């Protein structure tokens, strides 16, 4: 699976951005899709994930209520709508994919994912 993230940029605190991640290769609808972020000198951090059906969604506590993950299986794309952005949201944002299957997964761990996009920079100014 090849992943291409886009939509990052510079925004003021309180503003919004929508990230997109376009997938190609393996059937997109069979994949769990996740978003992670990594700030300078920090570990990669889980942001959100969505199961293949789109019905099971997970968020980190730091973004719950502000960010929304969604997917369009017809367009092979996953989105991250980010509202009420804060300076601490500044990071490189990565999309990731893994094959979905029956059962549960520890989707907040980067090691659970097989494929990664190249990242898109989000900078939130105060």
Image (cartoon, rainbow, N blue to C red):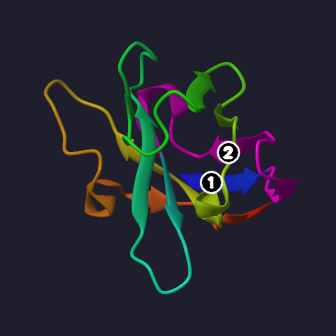
Q: Quadrant of residue 104?
A: top left
Q: Which mark is residue 3?
A: 1
User: Magenta segment range?
Assistant: 7-34
Q: Tell me where residue 24 appears, x and y as whole percent.
A: 64, 45
**15 w.r.t. 64: above or below:** below
Pick the residue in front: 40 or 94.
40
Left/right placement of residue 3 relative to residue 107 reads right
> In the figure, is residue 81 to the left or right of 43?
right
Q: Say which element carries label 1.
A: strand
Q: Read off the residue under disc 2.
A: 21
- The residue depicted at 27 percent of the width and 63 percent of the height is 111
Q: Residue at x 37, y 40 (%)?
A: 61
- Residue closest to the far front: 126
Report crowding for label 1: few under 14, some 14 to 19, many 20 or more residues within 10 A (C-alpha): many
Chain-order first, disc 2 or disc 1: 1
Give the x, y percent position of residue 126.
78, 62
Q: Is residue 32 magenta?
A: yes
Image height check: is 82 above or below 10? above
Answer with left or right where residue 46 lies relative to residue 71: left
Magenta stretch holds residue 54? no
- The mark closer to the camera, 2 or 1, is 2
Q: Residue at x 72, y 26 (%)?
A: 75
The local secondary structure at tag 2 comes to strand
Where in the figure is residue 68, as x and y percent of width and height?
58, 28
Q: Nearer the viewer, residue 6 or 61?
A: 61
Q: Does the residue at mark 2 contact the one at mark 1 (Cβ under 8 Å)?
A: yes
- Identified at 81% across, 42% down, the residue is 15
Q: Cα distance, mark 2 to mark 1?
A: 6 Å
Q: Quadrant of residue 43?
A: bottom left
């Amino acid at each position: 699976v090849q992943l291409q993230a886009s939509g990052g940029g510079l925004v003021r605190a309180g503003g919004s951005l929508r990230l997109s991640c376009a997938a190609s290769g393996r059937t997109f609808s069979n994949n769990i899709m996740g978003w992670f972020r990594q700030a300078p000198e920090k570990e990669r951090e889980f942001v959100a994930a969505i199961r293949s059906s789109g019905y099971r969604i997970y968020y980190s506590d730091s973004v719950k209520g502000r960010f929304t993950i969604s997917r369009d299986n017809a367009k092979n794309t996953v989105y991250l709508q980010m509202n009420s952005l804060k300076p601490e949201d500044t990071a490189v944002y990565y999309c990731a994919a893994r094959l979905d299957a029956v059962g549960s997964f520890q989707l907040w761990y980067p090691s659970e994912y097989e494929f990664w996009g190249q990242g898109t920079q989000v900078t939130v100014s105060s």
